[in-house]
Amino acid sequence: VQLVESGGGPAQTGGSLTIYCKASEDIINRACMGWFRQAPGKDREGVAGLDNDGGTTYVDSVKGRFTISKEHRKNTFFLQMNSLKPEDTAMYYCAASYSPGVEKAPLDPSPYAFWGQGTQVTVS
């Protein structure tokens, strides 16, 4: 299983950025997907989760600003980030899980078995 992120980079405070995760067709069709981030010196944090029914979960700090979605045709899922803040600066990772328990805590990294290599987002 391979997950490949792209789209990170510098952004201005208040600006927008979309990051992408290219996945296999099976991942897009069957797995629950999540976006996580890790800033220097901090633990990895769940940012957004997307289950197979289209249900979404967000950490409070990004609610109303970030949107997780997927596009089957492109085998890709996305994190659209608006109204960016300097505290959003981190390495962002996409992850996928087939675990039936992941939907109970979609922002907990433990059930996610498959991870991308990360893409850096820097807001200044």
Image (spheres, grey):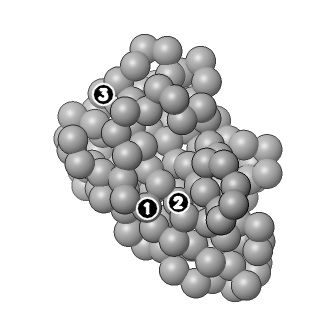
Rounded to the nearest angstrom, the CA distance separating label 1 from label 3 is 22 Å
Element on which disc 3 rests: helix
- Residue visible at 23% across and 48% down in the picture: 2
Q: Which image quadrant is residue 123 in? A: bottom right
Asked if disc 2 and disc 1 are in contact, CB closer than 8 Å, the reply is yes
Q: Amino acid at mark 3?
A: Arg
Q: Which mark is residue 118?
A: 1
Q: Earlier in the sequence, mark 1 or mark 3?
A: 3
Q: Residue 82 at what x, y percent from top left?
A: 68, 67
Between 29 and 60, the one lying in front of the other is 60
Q: In which quadrant will I find the C terminus?
A: bottom right
Up the image or down, 7 lies above or below 64; here it is below
Q: Residue 50 at what x, y percent from top left?
A: 51, 36
- Residue visible at 59% across and 55% down in the picture: 37
Element on which disc 1 rests: loop
Element on which disc 2 rests: strand
